[in-house]
Amino acid sequence: MTLSLPPSGVERLKEASRLLRGDIAADLAAPGTEVSEASYNLLKFHGTYEQHDRDTATARKQRGEAKEFSFMVRVRMPGGMLTPAQYLALDALADDYANGTLRITTRQGVQFHGVIKGDLKPAIAAINRALLTTSAACGDVVRNITTTPAPRQDAIHRRLRSDARRLSAALLPASRAYHELFLDAAAQAELGAAPETEPLYGPTYLPRKFKIGLAVPADNAIDVLTNDLGIIALHEGERLLGYNFALGGGLGMTHNKPATYPRLATPLACIAPDDLLRGVEAVIALQRDWGNRADRRRARLKYLLDDRGPAWVREKLAFYFGAPLAPSLPLPKLEMPEILGWHAQGDGRFWLGVPVPSGRIEDRPGCALRTALRDIIARFTAAPIMTPQQDVLLADLAPDQRAPVEAVLRAHGVALAEDLTPLARWALACPALPTCGLALAEAERVRAPIVTAIAAALARYDLADERISLRITGCPNGCTRPYAGDIGIVGRMPGHYALYVGGDFAGTRLSFKLLDKIAEADLAATLAPLFAAFAQTRQPGEGFGDFCDRLGAAALLALGRASRAA
Ligand code: SRM
Ligand code: SF4
């Protein structure tokens, strides 16, 4: 029984850290480019990861030189929403402190890469001056809260946006360590002199990262069921009926370790509209008190749910909630709407969804996306919203701004949604190499050739216009949610990937591993016989993932063998 096992090293570190302080202050002030392992682990709670340039590491080691250390800094911004001024402040930081790029994350955040140790404090202070925070963007706490990004102006979507903001603020750590370490005296004084406690998290915070997302059935852009707590607002027209709480989603796994696995969340209760925060706090308290603190690989809520069973979890949840739980309401089909391109918001204004390959906002030869976005956001006061597909929506544009906004993007060589195949529009790739310390293979840097090759294979079978989601990661941790889409390409070893198929476009079914260790150059050819059979024998309305699910692994593999024999 896991509870009797000794707590992991990270648990002991948190407990001894004096609410997330540890030796961070001394470590940041010390000479050198890196921090101690203890500070590395505690800094995550403050929104930053020490990384090193993996491209140069081996050569530097051979020359007897240290690795090139720098920090990734992640901004917490519920629902991906920024004001124009906040975006412009972040854009400026990319040059002042980072590598000249901003990166939209799959949880609607923005990351900076390449921040050197000496710049960490000023960079984080500048983010706070823009009324944003990096606190709890990483670490064993509630992470950035996602919600449907489309800025539709109806009561339900407005409610979800305000719920995301309210929950995010309420679930921030109460420790003053962040202010002490990164902010000036004035910001610290604002916290007052009340005694410092962590009423919700306690001194050891949560056993592991904890993810919450809010969606409506008609818009599952956030892949709600992949969250530890997926909240689905059920409504009749503009009347909110309640929130279905689905528990135990999470995708991280380790190759060849069957005790770890991806899982979609299970609906367990319906919470009344006025009880949202109380219900969320009950789920957090459940995971805080019962989650596995001995083995970090099995510490997510999904394992508690499977180890103890849904009935036990519901009973405990009712205890923390302080009242019996209503059963979850019947869940309508979840949908994944198209949000790129132009859309009416419902208030006379429009949003333009702009594709951002791998979420990387940068200027490169032939495509000055970063300059174009800065220009549009400054000149037209477009409100930017980051999407879980790593794209950006430019919201609140007046009808007469549509043509000039598009002209700016065109003038800077930015491809718009209509210029891309659906495959390219829906393809995701995580950062992987050279920044991610866990990457086993490339992802962002091979996105373009992989998408091109697979799009060409689709075109051969008249499937170029087919909506297929493609998600590439450099390792099995699942940062682009590869097990919740049609095709998942998961880094296995340098240049080689595991191939997952059979999930669905709307993110309601997990995929399965079809093949392992496929060379990058062979991915499109491996999928081609599946596309051929899909084109010929699909059922009406069937998506590619549905088709793969219906046939199953054995039949799909037989298709591959038959094609090789022909
Ligand atoms: Fe992730 C770890 C990047 C969304 C599951 N993730 C990491 C780290 C921090 C690597 C590390 O621990 O050293 C990556 C930093 C790479 C870099 O160079 O920046 C990283 N994850 C990302 C981002 C930036 C990917 C992206 O392409 O946008 C996403 C940041 C989201 C945010 O703003 O907070 C990101 N990560 C996800 C998601 C998707 C989601 O949440 O919707 C998942 C799968 C869902 C889940 O959590 O189960 C995900 N990341 C992981 C895991 C596996 C967790 C587990 O339960 O096993 C790790 C590794 C870990 O925690 O030990 C990880
Ligand atoms: Fe790194 Fe793996 Fe996440 Fe990609 S999926 S960012 S390689 S941890």
Image (cartoon, grey):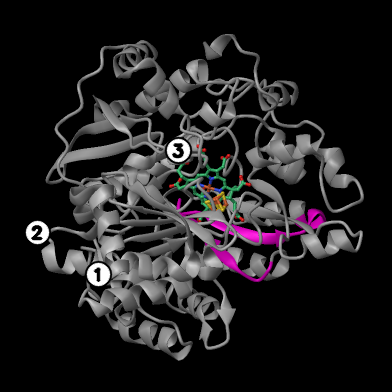
Which residue is located at x 70 percent, y 25 percent? 9
Amino acid under disc 1: His
Q: Which residue is mark 1?
A: 343
Q: Amino acid at mark 2?
A: Gln
- Point out the tag, 3 or 1, that comes first from the N-terminus: 3
**Residue that appears at 56% across and 25% down:** 207
Q: Residue furthest left?
A: 540
How crowded pointer 2 is (Cα within 10 Å; few <14, some 14-19, many 20+) is rated as: few
Task: Please say if the residues under marks 1 and 2 sit with CB atoms less than 8 Å apart.
Answer: no
Residue 102 found in image quarter: bottom right
In what element is the residue under mark 2? loop
Q: For residue 18: magenta? A: no
Q: Assess mark 3: CB under 8 A from ligand 1?
A: yes
Left or right: residue 128 versus residue 504 is right
Q: Pointer 2: what residue?
A: 539
Q: Give 37 or 295, whichever is nearer the viewer.
A: 295
Q: Can residue 344 be spotted in the picture?
A: no
In the image, which residues are magenta?
Answer: 99-119
Q: Position of residue 56 (x, y in %)?
A: 77, 65
